[in-house]
Image: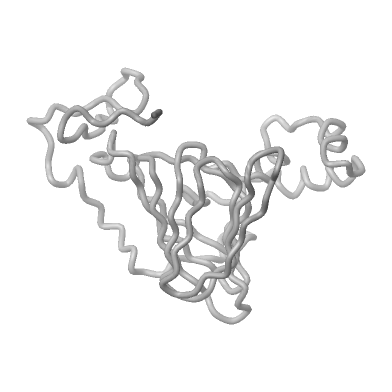
Amino acid sequence: MASDPSPLQDFCVAENSSHVLVNGFVCKDPKDVKAEDFFLAAKLDMPRDTKANKVGSNVTLINVMRIPGLNTLGISLARIDYAPLGENPPHTHPRATEILTVLEGTLYVGFVTSNPDNKFLSKVLNKGDVFVFPEGLVHFQFNPNPYKPAVAIAALSSQNPGAITIANAVFGSKPAISDDLLAKAFQVEKRTVDWLHVVYGPPLSTHQGLLV
């Protein structure tokens, strides 16, 4: 029976200049709301650069930060571009379920259920196929084609779904998590953890909303 509360008005356009802290954003006065509050010239029909990061993907996230009218409406979306052999590496969305539709190319996708089962569910998707990633579960997408790029569109059940990239969070935290702790947790030598700290120390990308 648990769910997010439904909006109590037609809309609650985010007032980003407010200094009041609430769960979400303070509403703009309805008298000041304009059509532009619900619009963004995102040009989602245009290909994105997939060479800006090591994993070969680029996510254009459309959330409440970019469309204030999404505030309290519980939805966002993203265009995801994948280079040949590019991937959207294992990550989670702490606040959203994701439904992904392949627009071009082929994707190998999957997610892992929670402890103690950790069951891995995966599927190869072709153009027009749809797959769902349940809220909070670790998931990924990978373009297995070494020659052709892939494109997908994703809808998420939150105005601000968030993303936690597993490798970046564990090995790229600031300050770094103890290498002794991580070596024991992953049952590897400490020098391996030290190497991973070097690899993931710098940010993976400066792109907004890299992972979806």
- Asked if residue 75 is positioned above or below residue 3 in the image, the reply reads below
Report the residue that reaches farthest toward the front: 1
**Residue 81 locus on image (x, y percent):** 48, 65
Residue for point 31% across, 18% down? 20
Residue for point 84% across, 34% down? 179
Residue for point 48% across, 60% down? 131
**Residue 159 locus on image (x, y percent):** 35, 40
Question: Which quadrant of the figure has residue 160?
Answer: top left
Front position in the image: 80 or 125: 125
**Residue 163 locus on image (x, y percent):** 52, 43
Front position in the image: 58 or 202: 58
Front position in the image: 23 or 136: 136
Question: Which quadrant of the figure has residue 7?
Answer: top left
Report the residue that reaches farthest toward the top: 20
**Residue 66 locus on image (x, y percent):** 32, 45
Residue 31 left/right relative to 117: left
Question: Which quadrant, please, contains the N terminus?
Answer: top left
